[in-house]
Image: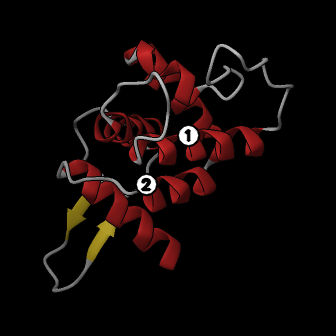
Amino acid sequence: MEKDTRLVNIYLKIHHKKVITMDDLAYLAEYDPECFAKTCKNVVYNIPEAKPIMEPAVPETASEKPAPKLSEKQNIAKVLERLRRLERNDLPDINIDDDKVKSLLGNLYMEMLFPHNDQQSFMSVLDTRDAATFDKKA
């Protein structure tokens, strides 16, 4: 139940356009790594200048050699580390708004995790008190 509560809280942050933290992104990466990896590719499609951050095989600087093939878990860890560095303004030659990248990553992740047709909502509050349900119809 704790996992579902955390996922709902992150979903609500994204839905209400609140700032997503690195802990939230780390949780999403752990919750569904495959979805997170696909979402990173979608972020690069929407924000091409984010490629050095979202694709772990891309060298950070021109002097670096391309990294060897890494496992999905290692790739995700590298992406999260680069996002942390972007948040601290610690990446050279990259001028991207970290909140924009994190927000897009969260939005695309939730869209992929919970595809919908705009006819049914994921969140529904029942008539009974404190009986909110999170409807996962993926």
Query: Residue 5's quadrant in the figure?
Result: bottom left
Residue at position x 52%, y 19% in the image = 51
The amino acid marked with disc number 2 is Lys
The quarter of the picture where residue 95 lies is top left
Q: In the drawing, does residue 115 fall left or right of residue 77?
A: left
Locate residue 133, reporting x and y percent. Answer: 31, 69
Residue 1 appears in the picture as rendered:
no
Horizontal placement of 105 versus 103: left or right? Answer: right
At label 2, counting other C-alpha atoms closer than 10 Å, the crowd grade (few under 14, some 14-19, many 20 or more) is: few
Residue drawn at x 26%, y 57% is 13
129 is higher (above) or lower (below) than 9: below
Q: Which residue is mark 2?
A: 136
Up/down of 25 relative to 79, above or below: below
The x and y percentages for residue 8 are 36, 64
In front here: 94 or 126? Answer: 94
Question: Residue flagged by tag 1: what amino acid is it?
Answer: Arg
Q: Earlier in the sequence, mark 2 or mark 1?
A: 1
Q: Is residue 45 visible?
A: yes
Image position of 133 with respect to 86: above or below: below
Q: Which residue is mark 1?
A: 82
Q: Residues within 10 Å of mark 1 (few under 14, many from 20)?
A: many
